[in-house]
Image (cartoon, rainbow, N blue to C red):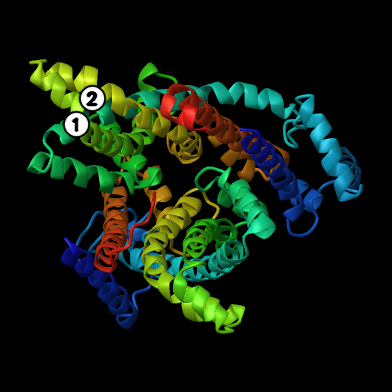
Amino acid sequence: MKKYAALILLLWLVAVVGGRLLQLNPDFINLNAILQSPNAQYWLGADDLGRSVGARLLAGVEVSLLVALIVTIVTMTVGIAIGVLAGFYGGKIDQALMQLTDVFLAFPGILLAIAFAAILGPGINNLIIALSITGWVSYARLTRGQVLSLRYRQHVVAAESLGANVPRLIMQHILPLLISILIVEATYSIASVMIAEASLSFLGLGIQAPHASWGGMLRDAVRYMLIAPHYVLIVGTSLMSLILAVNLLGDYLRDRMDVRIEA
Amino acid sequence: MVKQFANFVIVVFGVLLLTFLLVHMVPGDPVEVMLGESAAPADRESLRAELGLSQPLYQQFGSYLSKLSQGDLGKSIHTQTPIIELIKQRYPATLKLTFLALIIGLLIGVPVGIYAALKNNQWQDWMVMLVSVRLSSMPAFWLGPMLMLVFAVWLGWFPVSGMESPTSIILPAVTLGIGLSAILSRMTRTSLLEVLHDDYIRTARAKGVSEYRVIIRHALRAALLPIITIVGLQMGSLLAGAVITETIFSWDGIGRLLVESIEKRDYPVTQACVLIIALSYVLVNRATDIAYRLADPRVRFAA
């Protein structure tokens, strides 16, 4: 199972690099090819403007992974910082910060991201901002819980009584123990950010035409479902393979690093 | 209990504050964004006055809260209809959809979970869990079009979208409910497996109670509590999932109202929809928590 995950991810990587090397043009319009089903020239068919679906999928996966990486790095940094602050100091600070995460968690699913993206307006930068503002909460919760349980472990108390200052305690004695659990969380979060990005683009709030994005392509494909069912099938299958692969990778890392994450 | 209530109040206040601030996060002049650059100056001034944008922020928030307490959510910029009327029109459709999704989730999830628990560690169990884990990670905007393609376009069993026909609700409800059924089947399996090893189950079997009765009357009853909790907690997530599902299937609920209002830059409507969905979610979660406490004597007396 894990091998398949690696294989799928590798295939996507090769495809994206290959597409770059072959200089596939995702924006080239061929009005004779509109909604063509897969053929020798367009391996995965053509979309409603006669653009190559294959080339657009590759361009889309590039943007999607890029957005997911940036958002994950930003939300991880912010979330860990807030989580450490709350878990290490406890008391009033902890209470206030956890109250804040409660408010963010009161918005189900990607509702808050939808709201922010709607208010900020469409576009890739605003998309990243909207997903970052709403994505840090899970890291903050996770880190806080872990730091809370590590704060008074013997090695931390020992280092403290030997005169280690707070940054040293956190950087040298607490965070290293969190790394594996955070890596696993980050892998899953890449999959969920990709889904969130595609959802927003699907609603027309994310990446805008003419730029390729999987959510946008899926929306167009639904529109032409009756006359070109292959379009929705190809985009849908691709999307599924990538999300499954990233999730499988997360499972693999979780088992490998033997971390337990509570649901 | 008091502490939890205080926390609940703070969260509701936070939700109100955050949704209030939404309109103020519009880059540039919100009035200009909403009406467009070609709007007449008089229209702009009247909208600005109506939204009270020239007052200090805390005063605006105060009047927002006091209007809200009277059920006044403002007016739609485009149609001038009071937003509360729009919500009243659209909310029942969303509720209908969510309830049906919930029932579908239960009807699929619980039996499948029981089956997997009975076939524990056999290939059937392994298959069911594999499918349900993977299915629950698939987003609605993928599942919806796929179901639509197979059951509406190819097989022609259901209408593609809209809400005219009585069968229109099936596909969106299944889209919403399948994710829930995956979660429920895992939950049912785990909690059944936990109780199946308990002494009282062994006693029941030793007494010669039929296996069917052991599962349904003895084991499932004890395993029901976590299932109910999950249903309650997922109910709110269904409301959020409805935003995408309703858009795919052109189902005129509050989720579609939200997306439409975003497209028209009708921010007061956007704000109201976000608020209503979030408040519903918070309230359902709260109610689930209370129901759980009342239902389980172990939790009730421990508190």
Which numbered disc flags the more N-terminal residue, 2 or 1?
1
Q: Position of residue A62 (x, y in %)?
A: 39, 70
Amino acid at dot 1: Leu
In the foreground, B200 or A88 = B200
Q: Which mark is residue B257?
A: none
Q: Which mark is residue B196?
A: 1
User: Does the CB distance between marks 2 and 1 fall below 8 Å?
Assistant: yes
Q: Which mark is residue B219?
A: 2
Amino acid at dot 2: Ala
Residue A215 is left or right of residue A44, and the answer is right
The CA span between labels 2 and 1 is 6 Å
Looking at the rendered structure, the secondary structure element under dot 2 is helix
Q: Callout 2: 10 Å neighbours few (<14), some, many (20+)?
A: many
In the foreground, B1 or B282 = B1
Query: Residue, x 48% and y 65% (percent of image)?
Result: A211
Callout 2: residue from which chain?
A: B
Query: Residue, x 43% and y 34% (percent of image)?
Result: B249
Q: Position of residue B267 (x, y in %)?
A: 70, 43
Q: Callout 1: 10 Å neighbours few (<14), some, many (20+)?
A: many
Query: Residue, x 86% and y 49% (percent of image)?
Result: B57
Q: Position of residue A148 (x, y in %)?
A: 52, 61
